[in-house]
Image (spheres, helix red, strand yellow):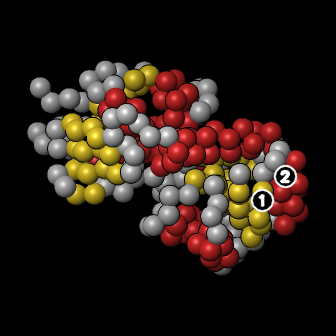
Amino acid sequence: MNILIADDDIELCQLLKEYLEQEGMQVQLTHDGVSAIETVQQHDFDLLILDVMMPEMTGFEVLKQLRKNNEIAIIMLTAKGEKIDRIVGLEMGADDYIAKPCDPRELVARIRAVTRRSIHNKTTKTKVDRLCLDDLILLKNSREVFIADRAIDLTSTEFDFLVLLTAEAGTLVSRESLSQNVLGKRLQTFDRSIDMHISNLRKKLGLNSTGVVRIKTSRGNGYQYVVNQ
């Protein structure tokens, strides 16, 4: 597993590098936003660990730039207690976040959960590639989504949520199931990452052909992809 850490805290970077390498991962470091973008574009990484506050460009600016044409898995490092940073990061397409100072063991667990989804989706061919629901077409193998022949740009995590919801179209999918099957972790009481991912997905998909929201919320329970009657 090849990982890039982008953080201007050199000491922290070195500590994380040493720990992750003990876990069998290959790690490169960069310490500003501009270098982070250049390094990602020049090399093939499985995942980027991206700090929010960096010189040259903030982590948010890096995330926005990369999400224009790159689907690399991204975990944001946010200041402890800064909930707004986590919300903004998820809205902009981050796959997960972890607060600083972080427990290296938790970081390893998050890395493995995120990259497990990414690697599985790149290497596994599904038996049914094409799924059509109303004006939505989902191509699982190429990981493309179209609405009325218009391509919809989704992050890797958003795509995975859509696959699960459309596979169970018309049926309520619990938040616990979404967390376990897409994020690869047990649902935490105050974790709103699922809600943010679904909110982003809903905005990108828009209303269906009858003017109804595509993904319905059952507050506190889960989500359902609506099927036209």
Quarter of the image that includes the C terminus: top left
- Which amino acid type corresponds to the residue marked 2 in the rendered image? Glu
The residue drawn where x is 51% and y is 35% is 182
The residue drawn where x is 22% and y is 38% is 132
Question: From the viewer's perspective, is residue 5 above or below residue 32?
Answer: above
Distance between mark 1 and mark 2 Cα atoms: 7 Å
- Nearer-the-camera pick, 147 or 12: 147
Question: From the viewer's perspective, is residue 168 above or below residue 91?
Answer: above
The residue drawn where x is 75% and y is 42% is 108
Asked if marks 1 and 2 touch (Cβ < 8 Å), the reply is yes
> How many numbered circles does the render carry?
2
Q: Which mark is residue 125?
A: none
Mark 1 falls on what kind of element?
strand
Residue 203 as seen in the image, left or right of residue 37 = left
* Picture quadrant where residue 126 is located: top left
Residue matched to label 2: 21
- Which amino acid type corresponds to the residue marked 1 in the rendered image? Val
* Rendered location of residue 168, percent (x, y): 33, 25
Mark 2 falls on what kind of element?
helix
Residue matched to label 1: 27
Q: Earlier in the sequence, mark 1 or mark 2?
A: 2
Q: Is residue 37 visible?
A: no
Q: Is residue 128 visible?
A: yes
* Rendered location of residue 188, percent (x, y): 61, 28
Residue 107 as seen in the image, left or right of residue 183 = right
The residue drawn where x is 31% and y is 21% is 171
